[in-house]
Image: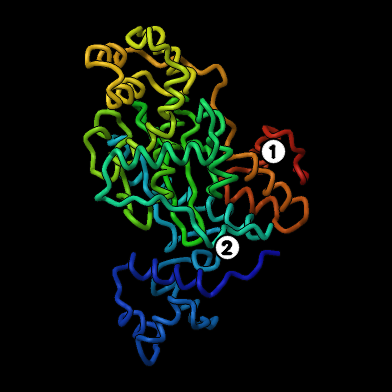
Amino acid sequence: MLDKISHKLIGFRVKAAREAKGWTQDQLTEGLGLNDRQSVSDIENGKRTLRAEEMLALTDLLDRDIEFFIDPFAVAGEAQFNWRADPGVPEDSLDGFELKAGQWIGLLRWLREQRDSRASVLKRALRLSTQSSYEDAQERAESLAAELDLGVIPAETLIDKVERELDIPVLFVDTVETADGKSISGATCHLEEMGVILINRNESEARRFFDLAHELFHALTWDAMKPEHRESNSFEERTKGKRVEQLANSFAAALLMPRASLDKLIDKDRVNDIAHLCEVAALLRVAPVALAWRLFNLKLIGDDTRQSLSQEKQRPSVSGPPKRFSASFVKMLHEALENGRLSARKAAKAIGIGLGGLTELFGQYDLPAPFEL
């Protein structure tokens, strides 16, 4: 059986539903027939328990079914998202996908709690603000790459280090895609107790890693400079975007292409050799245009070489898209089902796939389905 959801989480959802309806606390106080607004404030802050009849009244007053308030996997009212999406993705499609992603993240949080592996209360944060320079962001990225011991090719170990050392889960997912190929690249989800990074697993390898590094910046600076709910994922727009996004781009470039790695991988006698630089970009799992700008900003190449390298196409990855979600997420899910803490139907509903899809997901990670179809 699922543990009872806490009053605090129910309170988050009451507040989210009230604000979505456009009601004030006074209006909800009157609707529930309570004596004063403080009672509603206490409910929303998790200090007061809702009685059964009050819960039923809320479903009518706020136009929500009871599952909205008691679903242990929901993150409504708590989660804040920063999405990297093509401008061509409609807002309602993004909103719909956010609800779906919220279920995955809520399930992930619940699984971590069942394992008694809550995030550390001591959150890692970069010492940066909106007043920081791009050089400051690059310096922090270089320092983090060294501290995490990412090696000469940071992309090879970045995901593992982000999850294990920084305790920030990374989920590879299938996102929204329009008929003309416009898509969501990824997101950072900020919760009080943890941050989660979502990456579109069907993007090119270089974009996946750049988005991961970019979203990591947001996860580590959220409290100091909260990003917009939505930002563009096009290279042309992000190079002239808002300062927070430009800082994130500077950080991502330096994290994936530290100066120490460039010094080791680039032959100084071939620094203007486009074929050689394309080989370096492929090794670093970055796009040639990203390497071009990084080298140009470091004053290692001139503008002619930058323009030529920027025209080169990224080499296709031979590994294909990563598996859905992550090994740690799927193993925790498998363990919860195997131990009877969660039903297969509840898990399948939260993920948004049938029991057959759940069996297929476990099969991708060489795990037998711990249930019968």
Task: Count all numbered tags in the image, as a single digit.
Answer: 2
Is the residue 220 above or below the residue 252 in the image? below
| Amino acid, disc 2 | Pro
| Amino acid, disc 1 | Phe
Residue 275 figure quarter:
top left
For label 1, the crowd category at 10 Å Cα-Cα, with few meaning under 14, some 14 to 19 and many 20 or more, is: some
The front one of 291 and 6 is 291
Residue 44 in picture, x, y percent from top left? 43, 76
Q: Most extreme residue toward the bottom, as rendered?
A: 35
Q: Residue at 43% across / 71% down in the picture?
A: 14
Q: Residue at 36% across / 84% down in the picture?
A: 29
| Relative horizontal placement of residue 334, taking residue 4 as reference (left or right) | right
For label 2, the crowd category at 10 Å Cα-Cα, with few meaning under 14, some 14 to 19 and many 20 or more, is: many
Which image quadrant: the N terminus? Answer: bottom right
Q: Secondary structure at mark 1?
A: helix
The front one of 52 and 60 is 52
Residue 206 in picture, x, y percent from top left? 44, 25
Is any atom of residue 204 visible in this view? no
Residue 48 in picture, x, y percent from top left? 49, 83
Give me the C-alpha separation between circle 2 and circle 1: 22 Å
Residue 246 figure quarter:
top left
Which image quadrant: the C terminus? Answer: top right
Residue denoted by label 2: 72
Tell me which label, 2 or 1, sits earlier in the chain: 2
Q: Secondary structure at mark 2?
A: loop
Q: Residue at 53% across / 40% down in the picture?
A: 148
The numbered disc on residue 152 is: none
Is the residue 294 above or below the residue 98 in the image? above
| Relative horizontal placement of residue 77, taking residue 21 as reference (left or right) | right
Q: Residue at 55% across / 63% down in the picture?
A: 71
Residue denoted by label 1: 362
